[in-house]
Amino acid sequence: MPSIAKDVTVGVIGAGTMGAGIAQVAAAAGHPVLLYDIAEGAAERGKQGIAKILARSVERGRIDTGERDATLGRITLAATLADMAPAGLVIEAVLEDLDVKRMLFGEVEGLVADDAILASNTSSLSITAIAAEFRRPERCVGMHFFNPAPILPLVEVVSGFKTDRAVAETVFATAEAWGKKPVHARSTPAFIVNRVARPFYGEGLRILGEGIADVPTVDAVITESGGFRMGPFTLLDLVGIDVNFAVTQSVYNAFFQDPRYQPSIIQREYVEAGLLGRKSGRGFYDYAEGAEKPAPRTAPTASRPEAVVIEGDLGIAEPLVGLIEAAGLPLYRDKQGSDVDPAIILDDVVLRLCDGRTATERDAEDVRELVLFDLALDYATCSRIAVAPADRAPDHAIAVAVGFFQALGKQVSVIDDGPGMIVTRTVCMLANEGADAVQKGVCDAAAVDTAMRMGVNYPQGPCAWADALGAGHVVTVLDNMARTYGEDRYRASPLLRRLAQSGRRFHG
C-alpha cells in the first residue's frame, strides 16, 4: 500500500509540544501542513517553537538553511477548524479526553473529503470508541507518535474495530515515508508500549517496597547490568510520577483490575506528597541545586578466589567463563550434563543464577553456602552484578562472591534475598507481557520488539530477550515467583508456556 502523496495536505489539530512536533515531521517530509489550535495564539507559538528547533538543527549541522526555510514555509496556520477542509490526512493531538476527541472529529468529518483519513495521536484511548459516532468509522485510525515526535522514531498505527485495513496500511506506509518506524497494533488498552512497559516500573516499585534494594541500587543494577538506558526511578522522575501513576491506574481499570497492572501504594504516596519528580524539584531523587545524587550500594573490595569450579552448563551466564580465564583464575569443569544444576563453586561457596526462587529456599537443597547472582544483558561487558545471599550464608560467603565478581572487573551490589532479584524479574515480566500482547492479537512479536526498542529505548525487545533466555527459563522464573507470592500477577502467558513446552521461539 503506497503512502499518501507529498502534495497531499496534512492537517494537525493541537499545536502543543506533540502537535507541533508532528507538524514539523510532516512538513520536513515535504507535505503542505495546516496547523490549528483552538487556543488563541497557540498555533503561532507552536510554529515559533518549530522555528527554534530547526534553528538549533542548523547550528549543529544536521540540516542546512534551505531545508529549514522549506520546512517552515510548508506550515500554514489555520485560523479556524473549517480551514482543515483541504486536508487528506488530519491528525489530532488535543486533550486526552474521549468526549473532546469525539466532538472534534464529529465536526472535522463533515469538513473534509470522504476519502480523507482521520487519525488520533491518542496514547491510550480506544480508537473504536473515538470512531463510534463517525459516519465512516473505517477511516479512523490511531497514529501514536512518541515525544519528542521529530526525534523518536516509533509510531504505533492503531486499528479500531471498524478501521479499514487499507487505511491502516496507508498510514503505516506514510509513517515510513516520513522516516519513522511504524508498527501495527490493535486498539486495546495502552496499545503496545504503554502496556508492555508496565512491569518496568511496577517491579521496581515492588522491589523498593519489599526492601530488596534501595532506589539508586535498583537503578544502577537495571542500567549497568540490565543494559537499560535509565532505571525505573530515574525514568519515573523524568516523565512525572503523577503522570505515570495516572497511566497505571488507567491501564489497571481498563483491564478490569488485572493484578499484573496493580498500581503501587508507594507511588500514590509520592503523588499525594507532591513529590512528582524533576518538575517539582524532588521525586525519588532530589533535584535541588547542590543536591547530591545518592550512590548505589557497592560492596567494598574483597579477596580474589584461589580457584573456580564450574558444574554443568552455565547457559546464558557462559560468557563468565571467558572472563574467568582472562582474569587468570584457575578454572576446572566438573559434573557436566543436562541434568546438573549449573553452579560456580568457590571452595565451600556456591553461586547460582537466579531462577525466581529466593536463595534461602534453594539453600535448603545444598549443604554448601549459597549466593545467587542476577541476570545481565551481557555478562562479558556489564559493569555491575547484583548478588543475594541465603539467610544462613555468613559474611564470609558474601565476601567470596563479591571477590569473585570483582576479579572479573565488576562492581557488586549485595541486595536482600527477594524472589527474582532485580533484572531477572523485570526482564521476565516484560517478556511475559510481550507474549500476552502477541497471543491476544494486539500485534506480532516483531512489533513488540520494535516498539519497545524504538519507543522507550530498551536494549533488547522483550520477545527477543525471551528467545535469548529460553522460554523455559522465563516460565520457570514466573512460576517460582507466582508460587512464592501466591499472586496471579506472575502467571505465565499460555503462549510463553507453549513455547517452553515445544522448544519453539518467537523469532526463527
Image (cartoon, rainbow, N blue to C red):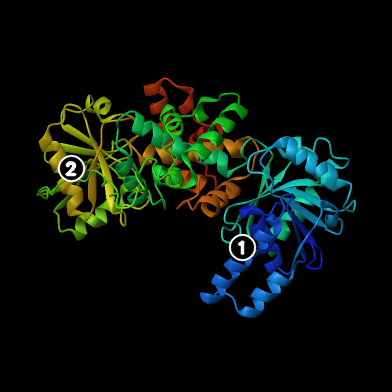
Q: Is residue 499 visible?
A: no
Mark 1 or 2, closer to the camera:
1
Q: What residue would you read off at disc 2?
A: 401
Q: Quadrant of residue 424?
A: top left
Residue 279 seen from this side = yes
User: Residue 89, image x and y in percent?
Assistant: 79, 56
Q: Position of residue 366 (x, y in %)?
A: 20, 28
Position of the N terminus by quadrant: bottom right
Q: Which three-letter amino acid code belongs to the residue tagged 2?
A: Ala
Q: Residue at x 69, y 61 (%)?
A: 44
Label disc, if present, on residue 329 of the rendered structure: none
Q: Is residue 403 left or right of residue 427?
A: left
318 above or below 202?
A: below
Q: Residue at x 20, y 27 (%)?
A: 391
Q: Residue at x 14, y 37 (%)?
A: 397
**Alpha-carbon neighbours of circle 2 within 10 Å: few (<14), some, or many (≥20)?**
many
Give how far across and how far down residue 199 sits, in percent: 47, 37
Based on the displayed image, in which of its 4 quarters is residue 6 positioned? bottom right
Kind of element beneath mark 2: helix
For the residue labelled by badge 1, is the local secondary structure a helix, a strand or a loop? Answer: helix
Depth check: give the residue in front, 384 or 479.
Answer: 384
Q: Residue furthest front?
A: 40
- Image: 283 above or below 377: above
Query: Tag 1: residue type?
Result: Gly
Q: CA distance from mark 1 to mark 2?
A: 54 Å
In the figure, 97 relative to 234: above or below?
A: above
| Numbered badge on residue 49 | 1
Q: Nearer the viewer, residue 466 or 318?
A: 466
Q: Residue furthest top?
A: 486
Q: Is residue 155 left or right of residue 301?
A: right
- Nearer the observer, 204 or 109: 109
